[in-house]
């Protein structure tokens, strides 16, 4: 049984729903910041970081497919690292598609959740179903045999479908906003680590910024590439916030003001 205080939100005005969206957005951003900076909350942060890694590697994989290549496999390891193995396609687009793909995914999800709250349950179900299908097609065990990517993709996908079918709209909106903001800001949240470990590798695999500098723009430092990706990620999310929440709310406030003045 749903709580009485939450049962009448579908009858609220669009203006009130936009105010709710702003509040939920603020809560989501504060929540993400706290999760990433308070060690005692690591038990909550861990599955969220795995989800972001999943989206990151899915971004590489989807760009490979979009540019005519193929996905051999992608993996997520228990330590939160991931790897997408692709063949063909445009390496200049595949390499940044991890961070920038996560930023684009998060920004689009944020826009959809806050601009179209009446479809929030459908968004969650569609996202969960897509995650399950993508996982079954391309996720594989990592080099140690861990099934993290498969368990994560199917588990998160099933959970999102359950949330879309059973959980109240406002709670669903908060949860999806947390996922959206986390993905959209991944490049920023990882920027310090990326810039200070710019030469780090996983076996023969360089991190994305170092690999991009080596293979695509050898005259541009990897640290500058990482910074540029972070700025693009912030711009994407800022655009999503403006068009998804702030602009509609401002229009509704202006319309109410005009009606009061009889314009």
Image: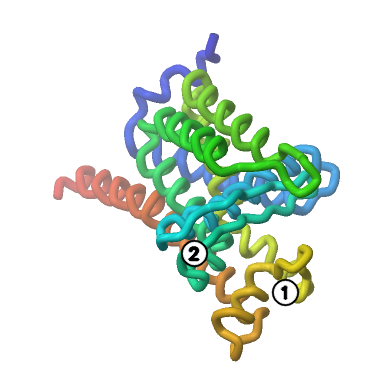
Q: Which residue: 57% across, 60% down?
A: 98
Farthest residue, direction right: 40
Q: Quadrant of residue 202?
A: bottom right
* Vertical position of residue 223 compared to residue 3: above or below: below
- The answer to which of 71 and 153 lies nearer the viewer is 71
Residue at image point 53% right, 45% down:
25
Q: Residues within 10 Å of mark 2 (few under 14, many from 20)?
A: few
Q: Residue 87 versus residue 196: which sits nearer the camera?
A: 87
Q: Position of residue 180 (x, y in %)?
A: 54, 47
Q: Residues within 10 Å of mark 1 (few under 14, many from 20)?
A: some
At horizontal 52% and vertical 31% (from top left) the residue drawn is: 172
Q: CA distance from mark 1 to mark 2?
A: 28 Å
Residue at 74% in and 68% down: 204
159, 139: nearer the viewer: 139
Coordinates of residue 149 in the picture (x, y in percent) = 66, 41
Q: Secondary structure at mark 1?
A: helix
Q: Nearer the viewer, mark 1 or mark 2?
A: 2
Q: Can you name the residue that lies furthest to the left here?
A: 263
Q: Which numbered dot is residue 195?
A: 1
Quadrant in which the N terminus is drawn: top right
Disc on the earlier residue, 1 or 2 = 2
Q: Is residue 254 above or below residue 223?
A: above
Q: Is residue 177 above or below residue 209?
A: above
Which numbered tag is attached to residue 88? 2
Task: Judge left or right: residue 198 versus residue 176.
Answer: right
Tell me if residue 158 can be seen.
yes
């Amino acid at each position: 049984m749903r709580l009485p205080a939450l049962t009448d939100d579908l009858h609220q005005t669009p203006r009130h729903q936009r105010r709710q969206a702003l509040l939920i957005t603020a809560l989501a951003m504060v929540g993400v910041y706290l999760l990433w900076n308070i060690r005692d909350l690591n038990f909550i942060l861990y599955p969220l970081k795995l989800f972001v890694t999943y989206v990151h590697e899915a971004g590489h994989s989807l760009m490979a497919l979009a540019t005519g290549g193929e996905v051999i496999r992608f993996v997520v390891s228990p330590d939160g690292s991931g790897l997408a193995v692709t063949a063909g396609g445009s390496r200049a687009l595949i390499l940044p598609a991890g961070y920038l793909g996560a930023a684009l995914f998060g920004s689009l999800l944020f826009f959809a959740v806050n601009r179209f709250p009446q479809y929030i349950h459908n968004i969650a179900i569609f996202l969960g179903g897509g995650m399950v299908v993508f996982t079954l097609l391309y996720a594989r065990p990592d080099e140690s045999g861990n099934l993290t990517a498969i368990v994560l993709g199917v588990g998160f996908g099933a959970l999102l479908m359950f949330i879309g079918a059973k959980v109240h709209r406002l709670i669903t909106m908060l949860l999806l906003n947390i996922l959206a903001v986390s993905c959209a800001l991944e490049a920023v949240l990882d920027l310090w680590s990326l810039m200070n470990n710019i030469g780090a590798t996983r076996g023969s695999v360089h991190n994305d910024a170092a690999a991009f500098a080596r293979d695509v723009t050898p005259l541009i430092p990897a640290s500058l590439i990482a910074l540029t990706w972070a700025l693009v990620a912030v711009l994407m999310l800022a655009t999503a916030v403006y068009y998804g929440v702030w602009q509609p709310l401002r229009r509704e406030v202006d319309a109410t003001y005009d009606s009061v003045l009889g314009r």
